[in-house]
Image (cartoon, helix red, strand yellow):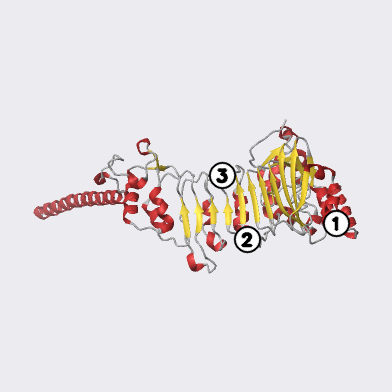
Amino acid sequence: MKTYFTFLNIYPLLRLGLAFNIFNATTERNDDLVVKQQQMNNSIDTFTNFSDVMDQFESLQNWSRLCNISQTAHTDFNIVCIIKGESSIKLTEFRNFTYRVSSHIRFDLSVTCEDGILYFPWPFRAEKLHRVYIKDCIIKDYKSDSKNQLIDHISDTIKYLQMDNVTTSLRMKEVYESLSKANSPITRAAECGPENAFAIIRRGTKVEFEDFHNSYLYDINALEQSSHYFSIQKRTCLYKNLEVFELSGRNDITRSTISKIVHTDIAQNLKILNFSRNGMSDIVYKLQGWRLRFPDMEYLDFSNNHIKVIPRIRDYGMTVKKTKSVGIIDIRRNEITSLTKGMIDSFSTHEFVKVDISENPFLCDCGIIEVIEYLSSKTMLKAYDYLDSLGCANPSNVRGRKLISLTPTELNCNKDTVVNFPVVVLIIITISLVIITLFTLIYFRNKIKVNLCSRLNKNVAT
């Protein structure tokens, strides 16, 4: 029986590359790989033409049975696999095949599963592997290459990586044994993944422990204490080509995961950053300096989260010379209920950024009248035309109505009775000062009278 659980303190130990940092000791597997690569490198039996590639691929028993290979260009091949039932394929077999392929050839790999299993060690390194797409699969052996230094010497050729609805299957014993050798660091390849990629996309990925019911057999405290080691060993990964980075549809995303790509790693050409559908509530502030960090950024997606407050988002404009287009910060479909005049006014200063707050459950009460009046009198930039279409979610009597169309009467508010909090505060302070002053005058007036009377009595007596 497979057991699923939500990560708590263990999760920081399980991030590898851009999403996980898990590894184990794989000495036997690594030794085999070293021997195989040496054999391949010493071999002159390489194959270059179409027929040779096809013939050699047929020798991969499971691959040739479950996958179709076709030539899409003179040196490009497309491999499409459908893994059903209890069938499986191993990346190590494909890796041995690609060692012998001419350096001019490249492969695009697409794998879709129907309860199938992939034995694919991260970071999926194989010579000439150009594009990887994996959907609906269970991946095992995911961490088996994470301490294998030889993997760093396999060419990092992956340009596009996408994983949709993929489950990484782990065993408690493997995790525990790997962490007991924490003085042996993971490789750069395991931590950074495909550094030459143009796009890295992970949608709806998750981690599953096959035997979490056996966790009582292991010292969980030791795992938690080991987390300090993993948090300080992080490298700065250099993604010189990366334009699209997505981690979406995950409930276990952490601040450190966000910070890695946003603050630690270097990806100056990044154009699209997607953290949608992750259950986040307070992460937006991490990107206050978004344009300085990512001068080419075009789209930041925080939609479909639990964000309740919009931070002040600056438009750095031409302070960044590479700025060429408007960057969109998408905060649609979150939990923002309140709008203020100050918030909308800050949008009016934007020239190279557009903040999209539509489709949020706005509360249209008396406090919204100031916003309505501001929008009615202010000419906003074209990028903010959508503000006129913002709708109300509450109260029920105006649900679905456009905010701009409401009147104080419909909101049961008279303009004269709408509370202006700054004015109220000022009035309260003024009244308090007047009262204090009056009491002070009365007190000292009475004291002066007493003193005068005393002096007069003395004078009379003498």
- Residue 93 x, y percent position in the rendering: 83, 48
Q: Quadrant of the C terminus?
A: bottom left
* Residue 194 tag number: none
Q: Are marks 3 and 1 in contact (CB under 8 Å)?
A: no
Picture coordinates of residue 2, whole percent (x, y):
71, 33
Q: Which residue is mark 3?
A: 277
Marks 1/2 in contact by CB < 8 Å: the verdict is no
- In the image, farthest residue toward the top: 1
Quadrant in the picture for residue 459: bottom left
Q: Earlier in the sequence, mark 1 or mark 2?
A: 1
> What quarter of the picture does the N terminus occupy?
top right
Q: Amino acid at mark 2?
A: Ala
Q: Secondary structure at mark 1?
A: loop
**In this figure, which residue is indicated by the disc labeled 1?**
100
Q: How far apart are the two marked residues, 3 and 2, measured between alpha carbons?
A: 23 Å
Q: Residue at x 77, y 35 (%)?
A: 86
Disc 2 on helix, strand or loop? Answer: loop
Q: Is residue 375 visible?
A: yes
Q: Nearer the viewer, residue 128 or 286?
A: 128
Q: Nearer the viewer, mark 3 or mark 1?
A: 1
Q: Disc 1 to disc 2, how far (Cα)?
A: 33 Å
Sequence-earlier tag: 3 or 2 = 2
| Residue under pointer 2 | 267
Callout 1: few (<14), some (14-19), or many (20+) C-alpha neighbours within 10 Å? some
Report if residue 313 is visible in the image: no
Q: Residue at x 20, y 52 (%)?
A: 441
Instruction: Identify residue type, mark 1.
Output: Arg
Mark 2 Cα shell of 10 Å, populated few (<14), some (14-19), many (≥20): many
Nearest the viewer among 78 and 371 is: 78
- Corner quadrant of residue 196: bottom right
Cα–Cα span, label 3 and label 1 = 42 Å
The picture places residue 292, in percent across and down from the top left corner, at 54, 63
